[in-house]
Image (tube, grey):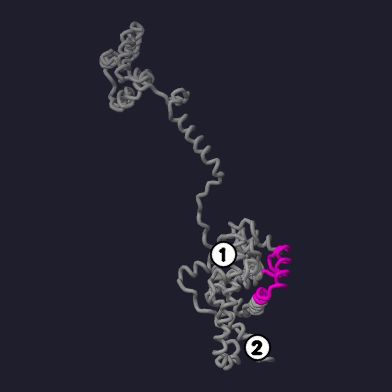
Amino acid sequence: MNEPHLVARAQQGDLPAFEELVKKYQREIYNLACRLVQDPEEAKDMAQQTFLQAFIHIREFRHQSQFRTWLFRIAINQCYNFFKTKKKFGEPVDSQEMTIVDEDNPQEGLVAAEDRSRLYAALERLPAKQRAVLTLKLEQGLSYKEISAELGGTAGAARVNFCQAVKSLKKYLKTEEGHDVAMRSYSTETAGLSRR
Amino acid sequence: MTWRCALIQRRLPDYPDGDLSPFWKRRVAAHLEVCPDCRREWEEISEVLRLYQANPLPDPGPAFWQEFQQELHLQLAQANQAPEPARFRLRLPHYLLGATAMAGILALAVYLGPFSRSSTAPGRARPPAEAKAPKVAERRISPPAKMAGSPAPEPSKAASTAEPAEPQFSLAAGHSGGQSKAAAEEQGLLSEDDGLDWDVDSVVADLTREQQQHLKSRLESRR
């Protein structure tokens, strides 16, 4: 069953059809929320709230955009509401917890874990909007026009946001690199731990 | 950094695979060949993008998604059972609302306003003088009711009912009765329905034949 048919059935209140849509997009929505709120548990709540709001308001979806980008919009609004209400950005993603170390080649796994740790630490320092632009552009593959439809503003503003995000990330990665040299001994001790 | 470098570096994150027009792709490529600073900047940006794309968020695992779907299913089922909030939404386009409201006002004005006097609805349009008549009718008892509630009238008393002592209620509406009726209408004491309320047969039912003949002769003589 194709997506427009599933959406049409979900608009008539068909819960199994909507759950098919949930299975199709749950990973993308969860990843977007995880990048934005930087907390797996909060991201899970945000993703569930996103699908719940989408189900409640699915009759207002007029097929003027893709269902996928409509979900992105709801998820971003949920995360912004989370920032407004909680007045905090939550705990950052614990990269050590989410790192899967390659058992066959632990040295490569160690390098990858360090890179990931640096990346997450640098991403944490970015504003939420720039994280959203990076995620939508690099992970979800949206164009600047689609990003501007998600986040507001124009396509040119989305391009400027993306450019600033990349430059800021480059700067923070350099500072994290210096910090990482000092912390390398600690990382070496903990790298052998797999996911808890 | 020259102004040309600033112009090029704004587009480096989109080079070579991003949303760049063919014109800008050619221009950026030509500039990178001659400007080592911009080329170094582009290599660093490419390294950042490569690092980002090489480290996607790991999948939490099937157990996580199973728990996610179970929790979400409960929330969705609860939301599906909740009644949809009733919304008052006018289905008309906004540009027709003014015309609809104006038509409603005009219809109300025609029904209640000065145009209603020319309407042919029975009992709707009454002269102002007649408006007082129901109040008077409430104060008095209608003659048939009075007659039904009272014992059988004496012949002389029955005859006196036909006397023009109360001209506005008299059956004997002769030439003087017509004048008194007109006077009563002017005073608002008599409505046009009063003459129709009399049931002559019930009035004269209790009278003897002689009294009925007498009453008839009196009525004939006054007509």
Q: Which residue is mark 1?
A: A74
The chain under label 2 reads: A
Q: Nearer the viewer, residue A44 or B76?
A: A44
* Displayed quadrant of residue B29: bottom right
Disc 1 marks a residue whose amino acid type is Ile
Q: Which region shows up in magenta?
A: B14-42
Where residue B195 is drawn, which disc sits there?
Answer: none
Q: Residue at x 66, y 77 (%)?
A: B40
What x and y, as percent, mark residue B176?
31, 9
Q: Is residue B110 left or right of residue B127?
A: right
Mark 1 or mark 2: name the one nearer the start of the chain.
Answer: 1
Left or right, A97 with respect to B11, comes to left
The disc labelled 2 sits on which kind of residue? Gly
B14 over B154 or under it: above or below: below
Q: Is residue A138 visible?
A: yes
- B169 in relation to A152, above or below: above
In the rendered image, residue A89, in percent from the top left (x then y), is placed at 49, 74
Quarter occupied by the C terminus of chain A: bottom right
Identify the residue position indicated by label 2 in the image: A109
